[in-house]
Image (cartoon, rainbow, N blue to C red):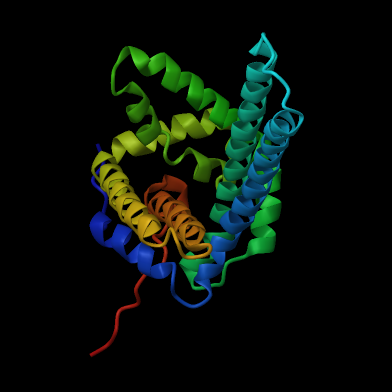
C-alpha cells in the first residue's frame, strides 16, 4: 500500500472552499441543468398520474376489476423515470469533472469543453455504470460487498473522463489506485459522508425556501465531483506533479 504524500484531511476540507473561490461556483450549473431536466420529467409524470385519477373522480367510474394493467403502467413509468435520472446524473457528473479540471491550475471552469468531453465519454460511462452495478450485485454474498465495490471504483469516472480510459480499464485502474492509497481514499469517503450529512440538514432547513433544497443538492453533488477529481489528480500515477495548492499560501 502506498502512503499518500499529502494531507488528505486538509485536501478534502479545502476542496469545499475551492468551490466558492472566484468563478468556480459555475461548476454547479451542470447539476442545476440536470435537476431541471429531472424535475421537468417528474412534473410530467405527476401530471399524467393526476389526470388519470381526476378523470376517474369526475366520471365517477367504478374501479376496474383488474388493476394489473394500471400497476404495470405505473411501474414502467417509474422505471423509465429512474433510468432517465441515472443517465442524466451520470452525464452531468462527467460534465462537472471535465469542466472543473482547469480550476486546479488556477483557471476558470470550462463548461463548453466539459460538455463536449462528457458527450465523448458518455457511452463508456454508461458501460461503467452497468458493469459496476453487476459487480455490486455479485458482491452481495458479502454484506458490505457493494460498499467495497463503490469505494474501490470511486476513481473510475475520472479515469474515463480525464484519462481517456475505457470502462473496463478504468475499473481496474480505480481498484488498483484506491487499494494502493487506502488511507487517503477512506479519508475522502469519510469527508463525502460528513458533507452529505450536513447537506441533509441544510435541505431540511431550506425546505420551505424556493429552490433552497435544489441549490443545496447541486452544491453537494458538485463538491463530490471536485473532491474525487482532486484526489484522483493527486494520486493517479500519470498525473505527474501535484496540482497547485487549493488554498494559496500567504506570505507573512
The N terminus is located in which quarter?
A: top left
Q: Position of residue 70 (x, y in %)?
A: 67, 19
Tell me the residue at 33%/28% (across/down): 148
The single residue placed furthest to the bottom in the displayed view is 252
Of 59 and 2, which appears nearest the observer? 59
Q: Position of residue 173 (x, y in %)?
A: 45, 34
Tell me the residue at 49%/24% (across/down): 133
- Relative to 30, 133 lies left or right: left
Of 105 and 124, which appears nearest the observer? 124
Of 227 and 80, which appears nearest the observer? 80
Q: Position of residue 222 (x, y in %)?
A: 48, 56
Tell me the residue at 30%/47% (across/down): 193
- Relative to 23, 240 lies left or right: left
Q: Quadrant of residue 179?
A: top left
Q: Is residue 203 above or below residue 175?
A: below
Q: Is residue 136 visible?
A: yes
Amino acid at each position: 500500500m502506498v502512503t499518500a504524500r499529502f494531507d488528505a484531511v486538509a485536501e478534502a476540507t479545502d476542496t469545499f472552499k475551492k468551490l466558492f473561490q472566484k468563478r468556480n461556483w459555475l461548476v454547479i450549473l451542470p447539476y442545476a441543468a440536470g435537476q431541471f431536466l429531472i424535475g421537468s420529467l417528474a412534473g410530467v409524470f405527476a401530471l399524467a398520474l393526476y389526470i388519470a385519477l381526476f378523470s376517474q373522480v369526475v366520471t365517477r367510474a367504478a374501479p376496474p376489476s383488474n388493476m394489473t394493467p394500471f400497476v404495470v403502467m405505473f411501474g414502467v413509468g417509474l422505471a423509465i423515470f429512474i433510468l432517465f435520472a441515472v443517465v442524466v446524473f451520470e452525464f452531468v457528473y462527467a460534465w462537472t469533472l471535465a469542466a472543473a479540471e482547469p480550476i486546479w491550475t488556477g483557471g476558470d471552469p470550462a463548461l463548453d469543453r466539459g460538455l463536449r468531453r462528457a458527450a465523448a465519454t458518455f457511452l463508456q460511462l454508461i458501460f461503467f455504470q452497468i458493469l459496476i452495478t453487476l459487480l455490486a450485485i455479485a458482491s452481495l454474498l458479502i454484506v458490505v460487498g457493494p460498499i467495497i465495490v463503490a469505494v474501490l471504483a470511486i476513481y473510475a469516472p475520472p479515469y474515463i473522463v480525464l484519462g481517456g480510459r475505457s470502462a473496463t480499464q478504468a475499473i481496474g485502474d480505480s481498484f488498483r489506485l484506491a487499494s494502493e492509497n487506502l488511507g487517503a481514499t477512506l479519508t475522502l469517503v469519510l469527508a463525502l459522508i460528513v458533507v452529505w450529512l450536513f447537506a441533509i440538514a441544510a435541505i431540511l432547513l431550506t425546505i420551505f425556501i424556493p429552490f433552497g433544497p435544489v441549490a443545496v443538492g447541486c452544491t453537494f453533488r458538485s463538491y463530490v465531483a471536485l473532491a474525487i477529481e482532486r484526489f484522483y489528480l493527486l494520486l493517479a500515477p500519470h498525473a505527474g506533479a501535484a496540482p497547485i495548492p487549493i488554498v494559496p499560501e500567504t506570505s507573512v
